[in-house]
Amino acid sequence: MTEENPSRRAFIATGAAAVALTAVSSPIAQSKPLVLTPQCVDDDDTPSNIEGPYFKRNSPERTNLRTAGVTGVVLSLTGFVYTLKCQPISHALLDFWQADDKGAYDNSSPAYKMRGHQFTNASGAYVLETVVPKDYPGRTPHIHVKVQAPHGPILTTQLFFPDNLKAYGMNVAALNRRDRFIDRDCEVALGPLVGNRYTAKFDFVIDT
Ligand SMILES: [Fe+2]
């Protein structure tokens, strides 16, 4: 078993509890579609963004990008992939790639450092264990991702961080302000920094 399994189970359990609570506590739940998450609004799909020059095909399948030699501020990113009608999508593909803690992409082969693809579980959930990417010239810190429902169109986009992110001495507020491609609709919900670890959440809403 891998080390991310406990957090994955905990996260899914929390999500299930939240759904159950909504169903029980709302008297109108029976007459209205169940709202699975505040992050998903009908037909409010996740915006696309540029692929950029550093995408590589055939990334390894893995949920943990903290492979040997990877250093930096740890980031545990979790979330769901939903349809435009806010139904969770199982076995959706997520292919992540990002810069490391020095703002560099690994373009060598077959290393594929800081690159990996995975599939959502039966609940539509994903878990990515990685590190906060550093900025690089012209760009604020961001994580690239392609998301695809089985047999659906590919969404290519980027995830961003709130201005209060603290890592590597970056002035994220200033970097965000100057970035040409930033999209605040693709900003992760960032938890507090605990030790050397951030947790963050982001739900994707995609066409199927
Ligand atoms: Fe990039």
Image: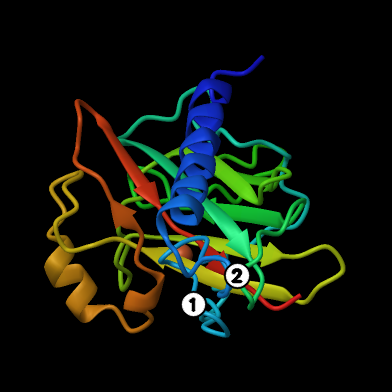
Total number of numbered labels? 2
Image point 52% across, 76% down: which residue? 46
Q: Is residue 152 left or right of residue 88?
A: right
Q: Is residue 63 left or right of residue 154?
A: left
**Which of the labelled discs sits on residue 41, or is there none?**
1
Image point 13% across, 47% down: which residue? 169
Image point 46% across, 24% down: which residue? 69
What is the three-letter code of the residue carrying label 1?
Val
Splitting the image into 4 quarters, where does residue 108 fall? top right
Q: Is residue 13 above or below residue 34?
A: above
The residue lying toward the viewer, choosing from 113 and 120, is 120
- Label 1: state its secondary structure: loop
How far across and down, in percent of the image, does residue 138 sit? 31, 73
Q: Is residue 9 above or below residue 153?
A: above
How far across and down, in percent of the image, does residue 137 sit? 30, 67
Distance (Cα) linking label 2 and label 1: 7 Å
The answer to which of marks 2 and 1 sits earlier in the sequence is: 1
The residue lying toward the viewer, choosing from 111 and 190, is 190
Contact check, label 2 and label 1, Cβ < 8 Å: yes
Splitting the image into 4 quarters, where does residue 73 fall? top left
